[in-house]
Amino acid sequence: MRPEILFPYYTSLSALKGVGPKIAPLLIKHIGAFVRDLVFTLPANVIERPVTTLDKAIVGQVQTIEITIKAYPGNLRGPQRIMTSDPDGDLQLVYFHKIKGFEQKHPVGTKRWVSGRVESFNGSLQITHPDYVVDEDHASDIPRYETIYPATQAISSRMLRRFVNSAMANLPDLPEWIDAEILRKEGWSPFNASLHGAHAPQALTDIDPNHLYRRRLAYDEALAHQLALKGRKANRQASPALILKSYDLASKAQACLPFTFTGAQHRALEDIRHDLSSGYRMNRLIQGDVGSGKTLVALMAMIDVADNGFQSVMMAPTEILARQHYEKTQPILESLGLTSILMTGRDKGAVREQKRAAVATGEAAIIFGTHAVFQDGVDFKGLQLAVIDEQHRFGVGQRQKLFLKGDSVHYLSMSATPIPRTLALTSYGEADLSVLDEKPAGRQPIQTAVIPRARLGDVFNRLKTAISDGAQAYWICPLVEETAESDLIAVEARHRELTEIFGTEIGLVHGRMPSIEKDAVVSRFARNELKLLCATTVVEVGIDVPNATIIIIEQAERFGLAQLHQLRGRVGRGSDKSVCILLYDAPLSKTAQARLELLRDTEDGFAIAEADWKLRGEGDVLGAKQSGFPDYRFVDSEKHGDLVAMAARDAVYILQREKSLPQARQQALNILKYLFDWRIEVSDKND
């Protein structure tokens, strides 16, 4: 039950004074349904309106001045101009459309207070469309510091400010959930005082994310979120799971590999084995750069599970990637006497039933597939490990269906893009983390060149020479087909042009093609039957062709840094030197130039991910909008990284000692969880 003290926060917005039946649905659509959503919407800006006189007015700044209405010059055309003055000068008020009733409301000779941006035009001071024109009795309506809220066409900033003030007046003081020592050290006010202060900024510095009021609120939000994540993790770890301890087969597999594991791969596999033998369900994220060997670590874990007599499944977001995982691991698994199968949506009739029977009887120890693996009718005999490649491309519901295929299924996810630490904490806070920060020995660095598209002819010539010498190459374009509205390069048009220039068959792959056609083209490219593959970003993840040593990316300035890094990772997968050419349209903005230069200067995916996050924001740092990311109101993931880390540590401390904390603190922490609506909920055994 929600604590009674929070009822005012969860009052419907339609109950507020002034929120009638017309405004309510617009307001709810804009910010949410409850008073909490309204008061958690902080000002985006603040305008200072200092009081001055005309002789001291500063051109270009917003100011408030007491004036006298002097005249309404007749003018049927052009803007409406009102002549005003004070004892020290003259001022024109300008409206580009006539204000009905203005002259009657503000007759000549009356004193008025006016506020707006003072400008100079033809040597005269003027304010165009003043923000306020009020009589002396309403001078207090003009705030010295005016908060600006995120507005829409229907819901103005002033309207929101009025509703916020009305709502804030009825909010109760909440008990303190933060430790007194933290409050003292950080210099934070109580929650209510901080919320009131955040809604009443007195200067631009007051709306900075690192202002004390906003940092306090951000910490509260981060703490509530981390308590929910760590609580779920604690519940999972308290759920018994089978103890898996036999690793003989994987050791044989490793001994047969033509290379040795990196130190990071060894550490990650030891992390996984510790989890599998703990007696509790694993939830671990393997985070690694392009080519760091995540899939091989996951495969060893799956072999471990098979060695213990149980089944594993690896689910990939695309059929191309699932098939690649299956085909590349077949030689290893066959040498160990393990049966694996590939399940995709392409399976039909007798073939599909045969594969389902192999899963149901346990004949298939390791299953690779797409969403087909969690469909109804796919029943596992003893599923113990689910590996999700590119987790962020699957919804929570899809993953949940997979976990329900077994009892206390261990969970291992993989991210092909390094994730900044703060985002890892916020998005994957309930998972344990293993980082692969080393590349396998023998990998050659990729030479990256940044070239204007005006030199396209030179690129064609260099590519011709390289292909004639036996190289394979990717050519990446941003769009599938040309449109009248877009100036982006279309892959179909470029494919036709490249075919004419090179006079040979060139592969074409894009997202609108049927899967069977895409797979066929990629397979031919992998077999070196096609020297050049013209594609969109459909090849961004998972395509592994060691002989491909050149990738050309057109209009590279249109892509995110993380996505460019992923695309570049399609080459450099063998022992030969590789080249990435980033073609751009001049002129470049300073930001675009900085991004491309960073990519040219480093292959460190972690540094690139941090830079991409700061330049683009967190939403697309993994190449796709993260459905699992928290919808923060107060936390700025970049500016508040230290607070998120601090909240993560504090949440662990609180959960370890929760029952020994004073009763009042326990109740306050419960209020915090409900206030931010991030409570610990376990919907079933595998949540």
Image (spheres, rainbow, N blue to C red):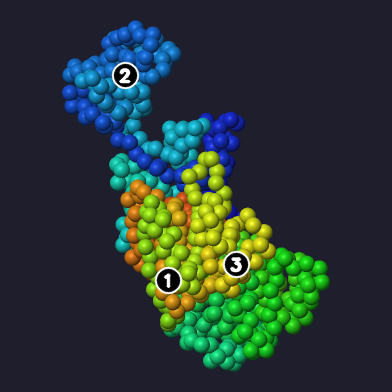
Q: Is residue 355 visible?
A: yes
User: Secondary structure under badge 2?
Assistant: strand
Residue nearest the observer in this picture, 147 or 292: 292
In which quadrant will I find the N terminus? bottom right
Q: Quadrant of residue 636?
A: bottom left
Q: Pick the quarter of the image with the C terminus.
A: bottom right
Label 3, label 2: how many angstroms apart (C-alpha)? 68 Å
- Callout 2 amino acid: Leu
User: Whole-Å distance between the Cαs marked 1 and 3?
Assistant: 19 Å
* Mark nearer the N terminus (2 vs 1): 2
In this figure, which residue is indicated by the disc labeled 1?
Answer: 578
Is residue 168 toward the left or the right of residue 59 in the image? right
Instruction: Specify which label sits upstream in the sequence, 3 or 2.
Output: 2
- Above/below status of 661 relative to 555: below
Q: Residue at x 34, y 54 (%)?
A: 593
Say which residue label 2 marks.
93
**Residue 260 x, y percent position in the rendering:** 47, 87
Amino acid type of the residue that numbered disc 1 sits on in the rendered structure: Ser
In the image, residue 475 above or below residue 75: below
Which residue appears farthest toward the front when viewing the image?
503
Q: What's the amino acid at mark 3?
A: Val
